[in-house]
Structures are given as C-alpha cells and as structure tokens.
Amino acid sequence: MGRVQDKVAVVSGGAAGLGAASCRALAREGAKIVIGDLRAEPGEALAGEITASGGQAIFQHLDVRSEESWQALTERTLTQFGKMNVLFNNAGVALPTGDVEHLSLEDWHAVMAVNSDGVFLGVKHAVRTIRRSGEPGSIINTSSIMGLVGMATATAYTAAKGAVRLLTKTAALYCAKSGYDIRVNSIHPGFISTDMLHGTLAHTETTERRLKEIAESTPMGRLGEPMDIAYGVLYLASDESKYMTGAELVIDGGYTAQ
C-alpha cells in the first residue's frame, strides 16, 4: 500500500477499460483521482465507487480533442486537490479502421483527433500544470504495440500510435533538458480484453473466431486483462520508476518479440 500515496493522478478515458482499471489501482495505492471522460454516467459511478472504498476521486467531463476542455480539467484538478502529479494520457479510439488505399480523409482525421491531437494536448497541459504544482511529475501516454509494428487494416490507428511513441520521447527530452522534474513515458498494450477490442471485432465476420486467432498469435496464448496494463501504469506513476523517461513499457504477452 501507498506506492503513490498523496499523489494526484488524472486519467483521461478513465471511465472504462484500461483507464478505469488504472484509476482503481492508483486509488488503492493512495492517489487522489481525477477521472476525465466524455461519459458522465460511468465516470461518476467509478468516482463514487472509489470514494465509497475510502479513496478520493472526482469525475470531470473531458473531450481530449478540445484545448478548452483540457484547461477546464486541469483547473478543476488544482481547485479540488491543489496540485497534479500524474497524467495517464489514455483516451483513445480504435474505429474507424481501413487500409491506406480505401480509408477516407474524414476517417483519418477522426482517429487522429483523439489518438494524436488529444495526447499532444494532454502532454502540453500536464507539463504546465505539474510545473505549477511545484512537485515531481509523471506523464504516461498510451501508445500500442501498433505504435511499434504495422497493421494493414488499421492505417490511422497505427500512424497515431506511432506518433504518440515519438511525441513521448520528444516531450521527455524537452522536460529533462529544461530542468523540469517531469518524466514522460509510453505504455504499449498488446491485445487486451476490453470493450474497445470487442467493439472493433464486432465488425468482423465471427468475433469469437477472431479473438481465438488473436490469442493464438500471442506467444503467451491468451489476451491480456486491463489490470495487466494498470500495474504498469502504477509503476510508471510511482517513484519506483524515477530514473525512467522517454522509455517504452511494452505489455503484450510477447507479441512484438516475434
């Protein structure tokens, strides 16, 4: 207990999936949580669950595509908790998919707006807010194994996640060379059993068959679970990783080792 005691952690896309699992893990280890999401009902419910368990959590509406929305979230964080130490920059979309020949520019922009622009805005405002707080900070950006290797039918998603990987390194170098005590790292999930994965596969012919194929293509022979990623987030948020910046934490069951 207490690995992130009294740290204030903001989690974008925090109402479900990897974000919700990470909110719970961080709260159990002593962090105060700001859940940023478009979805108010599950976000408020999660905040209530954490509070009922003895933690501290609030929900704040967040559209990661909007700079004004990020500004409102960071100001609410400072008003409520007086500081910000951690951002898990997690919100993302997997759809629409498409190959490079047939994907529309509109669909490309829709994915990039959330998965690339949204991460940039989160990093920008987290750096400013953590500096105002006057304490060390950690920014964790959700990339993907598809930020390391390609996928023929996920053009915009892989491009955006690759952008997150290098934005992370650029921001890490900027903070270090500027003398800011702010670490910036990326986390690269493999195939994790979440609503996002299942929603993406719902557009294929046979969801169960495709899930089986994905599991079989992973050396460990199974899908990951949200808590597998949350434990990595907890490590990067804690002082245990105080000498890590600009790094990639890959949690993929061995997929990219092949």
Image: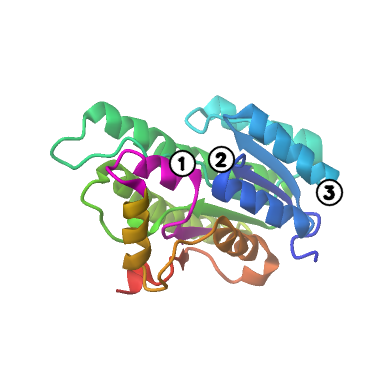
Q: Residue at x 25, y 53 (%)?
A: 151
Q: Residue at x 60, y 63 (%)?
A: 236
The image quarter in which residue 147 lies:
bottom left
Question: Mark 2 or 1 closer to N-term?
Answer: 2
Q: Is residue 128 left or right of residue 47?
A: left
The image quarter in which residue 243 lies:
bottom right
Residue 191 on the magenta segment? yes
Q: Position of residue 210 (x, y in %)?
A: 32, 53
* Spatial separation of the CA atoms under disc 1 and disc 3: 28 Å
Query: Mark 2 = which residue?
Result: 13
Question: Mark 1 or 3 closer to N-term?
Answer: 3
Q: Position of residue 62 (x, y in %)?
A: 59, 31
Question: Which stretch appears magenta?
Answer: 184-207
Secondary element at tag 3: loop
> What mark, if any, has residue 53 been given in the picture?
3
Q: Could you say which is closer to the camera, residue 241 or residue 104?
A: 104
* Spatial separation of the CA atoms under disc 2 and disc 3: 21 Å
Quadrant that contains the N terminus: bottom right
Three-letter code for the amino acid on which mark 2 is drawn: Gly
Vertical order, 71 against 241 (above or below): above
Question: Do tag 1 and tag 3 residues touch (Cβ < 8 Å)?
Answer: no
Q: Could you say which is closer to the camera, residue 136 or residue 103?
A: 103
Q: Position of residue 88 (x, y in %)?
A: 58, 50
Query: Mark 1 = which residue?
Result: 92
Secondary element at tag 1: loop
Q: Label 2 neighbourhood size at 10 Å, few (<14), some (14-19), many (20+)?
A: many
Quadrant that contains the C terminus: bottom left
Three-letter code for the amino acid on which mark 3 is drawn: Ser
Kindly tell me whether residue 60 is visible in this rendering.
Answer: yes
Q: Residue at x 73, y 45 (%)?
A: 33
Vertical order, 38 against 24 (above or below): above
Question: Do tag 2 and tag 3 residues touch (Cβ < 8 Å)?
Answer: no
